[in-house]
Image (cartoon, rainbow, N blue to C red):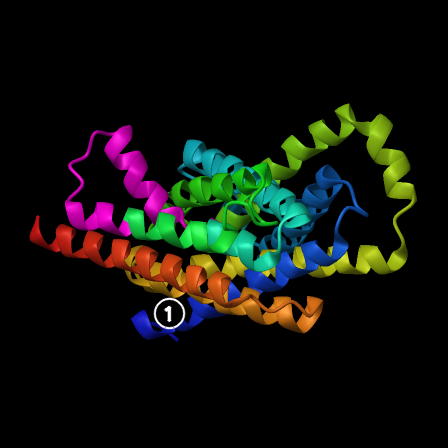
Amino acid sequence: MDGPGAGIAIMILTTAAFAASDSTVKVIGVTVPLLVLLWVRYLFQMIVLGTWLARAGDFASFRTASVKLQVLRAILLLTNSACTFAGLRFLPLPVTTSLAMMAPLISTMLAATLLKDDVPRSKWAMVVLGFIGMLLVVRPGGTAFTWTVIFPIAAATTFACFQVISSHLSRTEDPVTTNFLTALVATIVLCVLVWMDQAETMPAIAQVSFGTWTLVALMATMATLGQSLMLQALKRTPLSVLTPFGYAQLAFAAFFSWAVFGQVPDKWMAIGMAVIAVSGIGTVLLHGRTQQQV
């Protein structure tokens, strides 16, 4: 199944997989150390995709012509995962997801402040709209407005960079190879970190129950599936077309929040989530129009 329509459908499935993974992390809570959770998540992805490539018998698939970009992609995704997992430990699922969806707005601000790009007023209007949406979600003075909101905001920043690199690699690299190399680099980094922190992580691992390990395996499965689906979507459809459909993750996050935790976003949070989605989609559409005019 090829074409833009297929890419959009796969992207929506991608958001469902990511929302399911985030929900599972929320259920696990603090019963598993963060480093161990990340280590299992990427070790699982590395083993599954490495086995897939090895069974194909084409060992040339393990190679890449873009080593630096592959390493950078892995570091960005690892940082994104760490920030997301940390945010889920402190914040409600819809709040974490909503703030993480501000990636296009953050990209606009970085382009204007760091790259000195000429950003039109219409894009700045979307940034302001997104900021208003963020305030509606976290509501200063409310229970969700704490220093921990920095985690999903950092996740949004790293994910914006990660998607750009993923889009570039999807044009020349096999999606399975890219995800395997991402997992390989992340696993190596995490092995070093777990080894350095073994005095605290090993006793904590011994106390984790079998049921919790099952949830960890489910989380790793959904995360690996989501990454694979996203690259398949990017292979069929441009990033500028897919990005608006990434906001379907807000709807899935709200659904899982209700189905798993019995928490329904209140009126103002729902409005804020909608405002963030509109501002993000507007930013992407304005960017696409600008590109066509150039």
Q: Does 67 lie within the magenta span? A: no
- Magenta residue span: 100-126
Q: Is residue 63 left or right of residue 7?
A: right
Q: Main secondary structure of the magenta part?
A: helix
Percent position (x, y) of residue 62? 53, 44
Name the residue located 45 percent from the left edge and 69 percent from the top edge.
Answer: 12
50 above or below 189? below
Of helix, strand and loop, which one carries label 1?
helix
Percent position (x, y) of residue 82? 61, 40
User: Residue pushed farthest front?
Assistant: 141
The answer to whether residue 174 is seen in the rendering is no
Q: Residues within 10 Å of mark 1 (few under 14, many from 20)?
A: many
Q: Is residue 130 left or right of residue 197?
A: left
Q: Is residue 215 left or right of residue 65?
A: right
User: Residue pushed farthest left?
Assistant: 293
Residue hosting label 1: 8
The answer to whether residue 155 is seen in the rendering is yes
Percent position (x, y) of residue 52? 61, 57
55 above or below 103? below
Name the residue located 43 percent from the left edge and 40 percent from the top edge.
Answer: 157
- Kindly identify the amino acid type of the residue bearing the numbered disc 1: Ile
Percent position (x, y) of residue 96? 55, 52
Q: Is residue 272 left or right of residue 115?
A: right
Q: Nearer the viewer, residue 128 or 192?
A: 128
Name the residue located 21 percent from the left edge and 29 percent from the top edge.
Answer: 116
Name the residue located 62 percent from the left edge and 55 percent from the top edge.
Answer: 92
